[in-house]
Image (cartoon, helix red, strand yellow):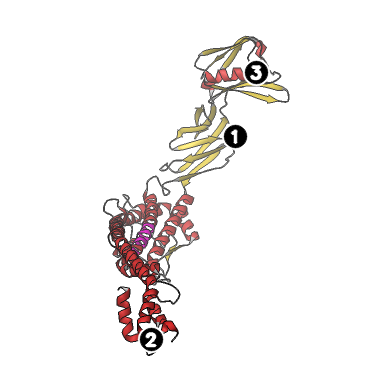
Amino acid sequence: MSSVSALNSLLGSSSSSNGIDISSILQALTGSTSSGLDVTTAVDAAVTAASAPETAWNTQLTSTENQVSTLQQIQTDVQNLDNDVQQLNSITGPLASNAVTSSNSSIVSATAASGTALGTHVVTVNSLATTATWTSGEFASSSTDLPAGSFTITTGSGATQTITTDGTESLTDVANQINGDNLGVTASVITDANGARLAIVANSSGSASNFTIGGSPSFGFTQPVTGTNASLTVDGVPISSASNTVSGALPGVTLNLEGASAGTPVTLNIQPDTSSASTAINQFVTDYNKVMSDINGQFNDTSSGQGPLAQDSNIINLQNAVEQSLNFVASGSSINLSSLGISFNNDGSLSVNSSTLQNTLQNNFAGVQSFFQGSALNGFANNMDQQLTNFLAPGNGAFVVDLQSMNSEETTLKQDITNFQTTVIAPLQTSLQAQFSKAETELQELPMELKQINQEFNPNSSNGG
């Protein structure tokens, strides 16, 4: 509306016997008697009114983003639970692991691989494997020049290397030369209160790695330790080992020799690793409870009444799947969740009675294995794994498909908002800015026009009449 049209509209209702009320006209057009039109506020108000579709899209976008982040968290928690049941179903997992107890671990300890036959074995350690070591005579320091001469290093295979000095090399120089020759030995300089010595040590223990040093006596080499094999008997069978870590004497068992037993036998008992099994089962319960908490949170959100995924059918399907999995009965197994000390809570979560679980593991470990793994990996763990895979499968899992749909919707909303801003809001803002700026200019000219009009209606006003 032009300033003249505005005035024409106002004049019809604002005239009085005392003339035109100039203040009322200014206030009607500007909203203030002391300032012009607020262009920025006017433009912002108009743009806000025109942005109703974008406001709705932004609300929908926020909702979709919340759904995506919530579902991604649930997907992660379900994946953790699935990892747990896969471990419980694994033939090399915690239900297949073994523990080895030793009657004297200061003499020999051991570890047993998954699937190793259970039983008791007797080990007698006659002597430990040793590593060949030679040391030189003492010199003033590591940088002292050595006498001119040479010495040889002969390895267990018969290979010989000659080390020569011309009177300018130090112990450090000789050590570096030996280490660079890859002789199967390592040289270093040892310094103490008496001076510095060159120490040469075989890279591995045992008689095959023993080596000799010959040559000039001016270097003063002696051999404090000769490389020898460990000597032991396992269940009465003599064993010679180049290392104090002995593999192969017992299938699946690694012996760690710590000392000689002076003819006294040490008893090793291979049994199921109930500690690892207990940890795995408790982890399963913990992660199961996290999933149930995620599900419950969609329907019992105290802040809004419902969570972002309360209307997502996959959440109901997940709840049904995990709860039904708990009712699985392993064929031929006398073990169930209750006998493992696992009980149900009112909110759908689980609790573990540690004493009951430990007692069952110690007295019926085979039954626990049978419950979780079945006769052909078709027990409780595999059943739940299959249920969860329906949601987690990379190609067509319910979560994957759901997230793809949500991400697509999110992308579309963002594009709609961008397009709306570009094609509608930005041009509108530019147009309104120009229109309201023009109106402001006209309003700035209005006082002069009003003065002229006032003089026409009140010709005596200029004379003070």
Image: magenta residue range: 63-74
Residue occupied by mark 2: 19
Q: Secondary structure at mark 3?
A: loop
Q: Which mark is residue 136?
A: 3
Task: Answer few, some or many: residues within 10 Å of disc 1's Cα (few below 14, many 20 plus, some between 14 and 19).
Answer: many
Which residue sits at x=45%, y=54%?
A: 361
Whole-percent x and y of residue 240?
A: 51, 27
User: Is label 2 or label 3 in front?
Assistant: 2
Give the mark, 1 or 2, whose residue is nearer the N terminus. 2
Q: Nearer the viewer, residue 434 or 109?
A: 434
Of all residues shown, which one is farthest toward the right?
193
Residue 138 colored in magenta in the image: no
Task: Answer few, some or many: residues within 10 Å of disc 2's Cα (few below 14, many 20 plus, some between 14 and 19).
Answer: few
Q: What whole-number distance in Å separates the C-alpha atoms at marks 3 and 1? A: 33 Å
* Label total for image: 3
In which quadrant is the N terminus drawn? bottom left
Q: Which mark is residue 177?
A: none
Check if mark 2's residue and mark 3's residue have beta carbons within 8 Å. Answer: no
Position of residue 282 relative to residue 13, above or below, is above
Report the magenta stretch's main SS.
helix
Identity of the amino acid at label 1?
Answer: Ser
Give the mark, 2 or 3, whose residue is nearer the N terminus. 2
Identity of the amino acid at label 2?
Answer: Gly
Check if mark 1's residue and mark 2's residue have beta carbons within 8 Å. Answer: no
Position of residue 305 relative to residue 80, above or below, is below
Give the mark, 3 or 1, whose residue is nearer the N terminus. 3
Which residue sits at x=43%, y=68%?
A: 345
Q: Is residue 392 left or right of residue 228?
A: left
Of all residues shown, which one is farthest toward the front?
463
Q: Which mark is residue 261?
A: 1
